[in-house]
């Protein structure tokens, strides 16, 4: 099968996870050591796994004594980007034991940080390890549906660096492993009406009693893929909503399958902290027929935005090999499209871990870093490339206005914008100006609203919807506006092009254009 061949070829791809260390040293057979040789075996972890700037986090070290006798007293120093943030004395460790040592950490700025641990005895360094972690501008939910043992390999598939949310994790060893990595674990409960009729809403509420988990994930709500839903489910949802109002700190997520029906979806506002929207294009290719796969994505984004909870929703593409599977190109194209259409979406969750070949799993994890954590510089050419006037006389000046957005998780480095003018009659193209900015900040994606009295809902304003006395435009991320002036010396029709050239960052829609008409006189 063609898909299988592509996945096999991925096995030879090297994926650089943000983990650095190879130096583990011993002195005088002390037996004390720790390492970050791989993500899975790392003895340095951070909780939460992806910290948010300005919020409290914890750096955790696991120190081992591999000798058959107790170790001497030792000292552990913790550095962040070369700056000492704390040190602690470690008492004698018993033979073949380990100890967990933690340091509080509150990063002020977003970015990639290098955590270094140095272990010494009597002033002599015996072990050192480094670990890199991303601190982001806002909370991200990057997850897998399933994070358990791989049945064939008999080992944890923990080499994925950027996962910080998991559902369907039941094995005690897996729970312990992911908690140590600072991930959020959600206990799954079914949304099937038959179970609720027998158990009542206490079936969902009992999840709060299991302290090994950080919250609850309710699965599917008994909706089939043709959109039918039993109205009786609303009784249990509304009853659970009342409980949630009394326990607002208990985290609740909901898996949504099937069509996003308004009568049902509006209830998410009342009880769900996160909605995970199943978007498995490979499962429904036969039903799409002549419809584009991406129209399926559009409809789900549009309904979630209409219901006012897209900013707390994450799409769930499918990575399973079932139903023809998905190629790496397919997966990346879907994520690029989702990021452009729904920049306010705070993450992504994949389905499913057990049925995903390890090479594709690694590639999928890489995409989380690329499209959510790294800076992602973009603009919407239809709205973010503008001219002060579209018809001018020869010798007059025109202003080119470009609005840039960083929809990624951390601030960018240097960004260059090139502006060109191409005369249509002869194809001659000249550079008008090069503009640069040192950094483009990552920011929250906010909605822009206008009072209804100021705007009438004409067709001229597609995308606006009425909500009470307001119209709400699709979300607009934080922005930076750049301007340049140009005075054309000849008449004619010009295509004004704006090109984004980031230094090392991912860029969506790097080119936009507008047409300018230059006459002898007005």
Image: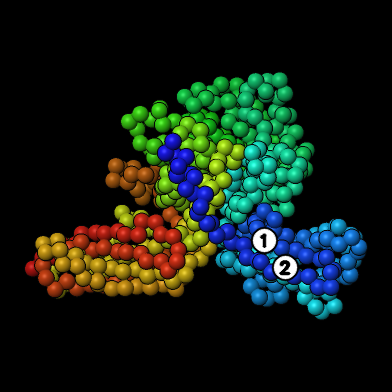
- For label 2, count other residues whose C-alpha is less than 10 Å away and answer few (under 14), some (14-19) or many (20+): some
Horizontal side of 360 relative to 107 (left or right) equals left
Q: What residue would you read off at disc 1?
A: 37
Tell me the quadrant of the picture where the N terminus can be found: top left
Query: Which numbered dot is residue 24?
Result: 2
Horizontal side of 390 relative to 317 (left or right) equals left
Image height check: is 443 above or below 176? below
Q: Residue at position x 78%, y 70% from top?
A: 26
Tell whether label 1 touches label 2 (CB within 8 Å).
yes
Q: What element carries label 1?
A: loop
Residue 444 seen by the camera: no
Q: Residue at position x 67%, y 32% from top?
A: 189
Name the spot of residue 249 as percent of width and height, x first.
Answer: 70, 46
37 or 202: nearer the viewer: 37
Q: How far apart are marks 2 and 1 (CA)?
A: 9 Å
Image height check: is 95 above or below 120? above
Q: Residue at position x 60%, y 21% from top?
A: 232
Question: Which residue occupies the extreme bottom position in the image?
Answer: 123
N-terminal label among 2 and 1? 2
Query: Which color scheme did the rendering employ for the protein?
Result: rainbow
Name the spot of residue 324 as percent of width and height, x first.
Answer: 45, 34
Residue 30 seen by the camera: yes
Q: Examine the image and state in which quarter residue 252 appears.
A: top right
Name the spot of residue 145 as percent of width and height, x first.
Answer: 60, 40
Query: Which numbered dot is residue 3?
Result: none
Name the spot of residue 51 as percent of width and height, x first.
Answer: 63, 59
261 or 176: nearer the viewer: 176
Q: Is mark 2 on a helix, strand or loop?
A: loop
Q: Residue at position x 54%, y 26% from top?
A: 223
396 or 102: nearer the viewer: 102
């Amino acid at each position: 099968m063609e898909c299988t061949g592509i996945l096999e070829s991925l096995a030879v791809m090297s994926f650089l996870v943000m983990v650095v260390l190879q130096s583990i040293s011993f002195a005088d057979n002390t037996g004390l050591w720790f390492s970050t040789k791989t993500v899975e075996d790392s003895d340095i972890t951070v909780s939460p796994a992806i910290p948010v700037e300005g919020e409290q986090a914890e750096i955790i070290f696991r120190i081992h004594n591999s000798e058959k006798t107790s170790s001497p007293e030792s000292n552990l120093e913790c550095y962040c980007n070369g700056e000492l943030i704390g040190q602690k004395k470690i008492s004698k460790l018993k033979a073949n034991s380990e100890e967990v040592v933690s340091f509080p950490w509150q990063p002020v700025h977003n970015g990639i940080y290098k955590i270094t641990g140095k272990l010494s005895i009597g002033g002599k360094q015996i072990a050192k390890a480094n670990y890199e972690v991303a601190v982001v501008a806002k909370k991200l939910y990057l997850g897998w549906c399933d994070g358990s043992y791989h049945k064939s390999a008999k080992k944890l598939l923990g080499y994925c660096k950027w996962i910080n949310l998991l559902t369907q994790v039941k094995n005690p060893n897996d729970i312990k492993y992911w908690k140590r990595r600072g991930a959020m674990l959600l206990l799954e409960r079914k949304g099937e009406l038959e179970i609720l009729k027998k158990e009542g809403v206490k079936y969902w509420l009992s999840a709060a009693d299991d302290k090994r988990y950080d919250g609850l994930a309710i699965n599917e709500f008994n909706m089939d893929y043709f959109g039918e839903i039993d109205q009786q489910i609303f009784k249990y949802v509304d009853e659970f909503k009342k409980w949630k109002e009394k326990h607002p700190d208990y985290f609740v997520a909901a898996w949504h399958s099937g069509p996003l029906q308004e009568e049902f979806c509006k209830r998410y506002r009342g009880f769900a902290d996160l909605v995970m929207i199943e978007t498995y294009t490979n499962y429904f290719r036969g039903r799409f027929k002549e419809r584009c796969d991406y129209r399926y994505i559009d409809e789900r984004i549009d309904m979630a935005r209409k219901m006012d909870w897209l900013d707390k929703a994450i799409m769930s593409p499918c990575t399973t090999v079932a139903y023809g599977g998905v190629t790496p190109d397919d997966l990346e194209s879907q994520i690029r499209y989702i990021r452009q259409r729904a920049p306010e979406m705070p993450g992504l969750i994949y389905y499913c871990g057990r049925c995903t070949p390890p090479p594709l799993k690694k590639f999928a994890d890489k995409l989380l870093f690329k499209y959510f954590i790294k800076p992602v510089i973009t603009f919407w050419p239809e709205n973010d490339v503008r001219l002060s006037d579209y018809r001018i006389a020869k010798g007059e000046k025109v202003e080119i206005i470009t609005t840039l957005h960083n929809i990624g998780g951390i601030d960018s480095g240097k960004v260059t914008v090139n502006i060109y003018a191409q005369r249509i009659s002869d194809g001659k193209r000249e550079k008008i100006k090069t503009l640069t900015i040192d950094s483009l900040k990552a920011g929250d994606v906010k909605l822009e609203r206008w009072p209804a009295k100021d705007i009438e809902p004409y067709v001229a304003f597609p995308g606006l919807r009425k909500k009470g006395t307001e119209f709400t435009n699709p979300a607009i991320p934080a922005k930076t506006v750049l301007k340049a002036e140009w005075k054309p010396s000849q008449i004619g029709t010009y295509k004004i092009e704006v090109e984004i050239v980031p230094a090392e960052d991912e860029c969506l829609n790097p080119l936009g254009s507008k047409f300018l008409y230059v006459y002898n006189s007005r």
